[in-house]
């Protein structure tokens, strides 16, 4: 691995500095709002499940809407998407404050409005995280992700305590009002940012096709699917602490809203430590070892918090939990970003969020039920057991190291000059590539074609097949379909520099004159005009 840039290197970029500072304020408001919502629910109901569902109502929409938000992030102006999301969340937060001051909030109305805030977060996050690659160079991307995590957890260390103080002095509605105003600096910073737009001669992908393309790319990328599975398992188990912390504060340590805020603050302090040491830890240990360590450390913190009845001890238990949380989450995030080309990074990140926050939503509900059945301590201990299982999964599915291949566009495709008058939507298109392969090269050729199939399908091809001529055994034909001509062009423009090695090796094995011959054909089916009209072409050879 090349020398690691300083964690502070992204601050050299003015846009990153301004947006990072603005997100600090927005994160502060969001954490104050979270404390207000969690504590207000404890005043509205005695149900542990309803208290835990406050956390689920924020994470569930991220699971449900993230994939659609990822498609928007890859096909629309990310800056505009983020501004719309921030404005929407500001309006909902203001509505929460008004209803809170008027005493009109019920448990389900509170959950519904926090769900809408979560939906805004779902819309915002893929565009925000994908924009890191637009704001800083690839070498600074791990530092930018870590700084974002550190910034959030800096606010986590003080925000909950501020939130607890505000709730204790002025009530939960005041926390909602503060949150509504903290969206304004980030909206202003986004309006000030004028990103450079790379030229794109292709029309925007249809929404449904864009979603399917993202799912297809991730499902055919083993490194990405491994990260998604591990992040889901971690999310299911690790969310137990955040979901049950209001109940722990109220029942086990005899504290009020302020105690709940300071407990969350301890979690944030631990997370800041994890952010500062993130780069050093990554230099010395493999990604898989870091995740296993974090799972075991978080499991011990869960068990310790579950058995603790002392406020000071509970604060101490939350320090390693925050440390392990940020180590794992930032590592997952960077792995996704470095393993995805720019054309699909928003959708890859959205699927990561779907897996992670879907696991958190499921875990919040499950641990709430477990707490109702056996108490918060028993639920936290069981969550620790699941975290140990998550660590053991790494024996069979180890987390990959960071992607070092260049996933920038190859940009070697030249659209051929056609002698038929096609429109971008003309199709379907069938493509055939002829290779002449010597007998002794067939094993290597087939191994390369295995990778070629995955690359083709990942980038949008359909019905891929490899054919061998029965009369000329040295002739092999690769064939695939794409729906339209513009899909064929888009398929070729998705080729990355990392794919060039496969292309060059296949060309080196080709024994024909020049490059392998490419045939591009449009399908045409002969159909009778009526029952008496014979099929044109029948009997012709």
Image (spheres, rainbow, N blue to C red):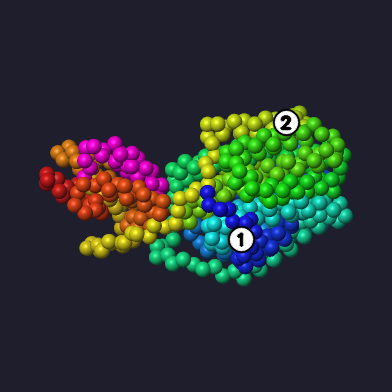
Q: Residue at x 45, y 47 (%)?
A: 217
Give the camera-side residue of 285 and 372. 285
Instruction: Tell me the SS state at disc 1.
Output: helix
**Image disc number at residue 47:** none
Which quadrant of the rendered structure holds the C terminus?
Answer: top left
Asked whether residue 450 is drawn in magenta, I would say yes
Q: Which residue is mark 1?
A: 10
Q: Position of residue 515 (x, y in %)?
A: 24, 53
Q: Is residue 188 left or right of residue 230?
A: right
Q: Residue at x 84, y 34 (%)?
A: 309
Q: Position of residue 30 (x, y in %)?
A: 72, 55
Q: Residue at x 88, y 55 (%)?
A: 169
Q: Residue furthest left?
A: 540
- Range drawn in magenta: 436-465
Where residue 486 sits, quadrant-wise, is bottom left
| Distance of label 1 from label 2 (alpha carbons) | 39 Å
Q: How packed is label 2: few (under 14 Cα within 10 Å), some, or many (20 or more)?
A: many
Q: Residue at x 48, y 59 (%)?
A: 75
- Magenta: main secondary structure: helix
Q: Is residue 40 left or right of residue 346?
A: right
């Amino acid at each position: 691995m090349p020398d690691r840039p300083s964690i502070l290197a992204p601050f050299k970029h003015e846009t990153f500095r301004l947006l990072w500072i603005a997100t600090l304020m927005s994160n502060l408001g969001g954490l104050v709002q979270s404390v207000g919502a969690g504590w207000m629910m404890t005043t509205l109901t005695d149900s542990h499940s309803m208290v835990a569902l406050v956390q689920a109502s924020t994470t569930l929409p991220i699971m449900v809407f993230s994939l659609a938000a990822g498609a928007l992030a890859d096909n629309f102006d990310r800056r505009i998407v983020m501004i719309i999301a921030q404005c929407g969340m500001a309006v909902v937060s203001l509505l929460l404050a008004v209803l809170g001051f008027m005493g009109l909030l019920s448990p389900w109305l509170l959950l519904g409005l926090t769900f809408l805030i979560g939906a805004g977060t779902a819309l915002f996050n893929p565009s925000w995280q994908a924009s890191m690659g637009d704001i800083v160079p690839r070498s600074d991307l791990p530092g930018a992700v870590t700084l974002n995590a550190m910034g959030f957890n800096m606010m986590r260390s003080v925000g909950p305590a501020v939130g607890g103080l505000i709730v204790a002095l002025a009530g939960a509605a005041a926390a909602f009002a503060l949150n509504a105003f903290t969206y304004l600096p980030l909206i202003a910073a986004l309006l000030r940012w004028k990103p450079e737009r790379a030229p794109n001669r292709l029309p925007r992908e249809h929404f449904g096709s864009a979603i399917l393309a993202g799912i297809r790319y991730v499902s055919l990328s083993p490194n990405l699917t491994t990260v998604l599975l591990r992040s889901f398992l971690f999310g299911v188990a690790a969310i137990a602490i955040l979901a049950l912390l209001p109940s722990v504060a109220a029942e086990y340590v005899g504290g009020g809203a302020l105690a709940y805020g300071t407990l969350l603050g301890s979690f944030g302090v631990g997370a800041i430590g994890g952010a500062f040491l993130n780069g050093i830890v990554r230099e010395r240990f493999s990604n898989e070892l870091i995740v296993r360590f974090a799972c075991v450390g978080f499991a011990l913190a869960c068990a310790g918090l579950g058995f603790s009845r002392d406020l000071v001890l509970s604060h101490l238990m939350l320090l390693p939990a925050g440390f392990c949380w940020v180590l794992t989450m930032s590592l997952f995030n960077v792995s996704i970003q470095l393993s995805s080309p720019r054309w699909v990074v928003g959708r890859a990140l959205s699927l990561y969020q779907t897996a992670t926050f879907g696991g958190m939503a499921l875990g919040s509900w499950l641990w709430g039920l477990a707490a109702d059945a056996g108490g918060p301590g028993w639920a936290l201990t069981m969550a620790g057991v699941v975290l140990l299982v998550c660590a053991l999964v790494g024996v069979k599915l180890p987390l990959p190291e960071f992607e070092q291949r260049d996933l920038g566009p190859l940009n070697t495709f030249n659209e051929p000059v056609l002698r038929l008058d096609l429109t971008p939507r003309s199709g379907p298109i069938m493509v055939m590539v002829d290779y002449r392969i010597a007998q002794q090269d067939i094993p290597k050729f087939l191994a390369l074609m295995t990778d070629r199939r995955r690359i083709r399908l990942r980038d949008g091809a359909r019905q891929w097949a490899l054919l061998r001529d029965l009369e000329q055994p040295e002739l092999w034909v690769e064939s695939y379909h794409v729906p339209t001509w513009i899909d064929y062009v888009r398929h070729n423009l998705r080729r990355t520099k990392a794919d060039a090695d496969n292309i060059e090796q296949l060309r080196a094995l080709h024994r024909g004159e020049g490059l392998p011959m490419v045939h591009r054909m449009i399908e045409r089916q002969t159909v009778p005009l009526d029952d008496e009209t014979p099929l044109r072409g029948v009997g012709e050879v």
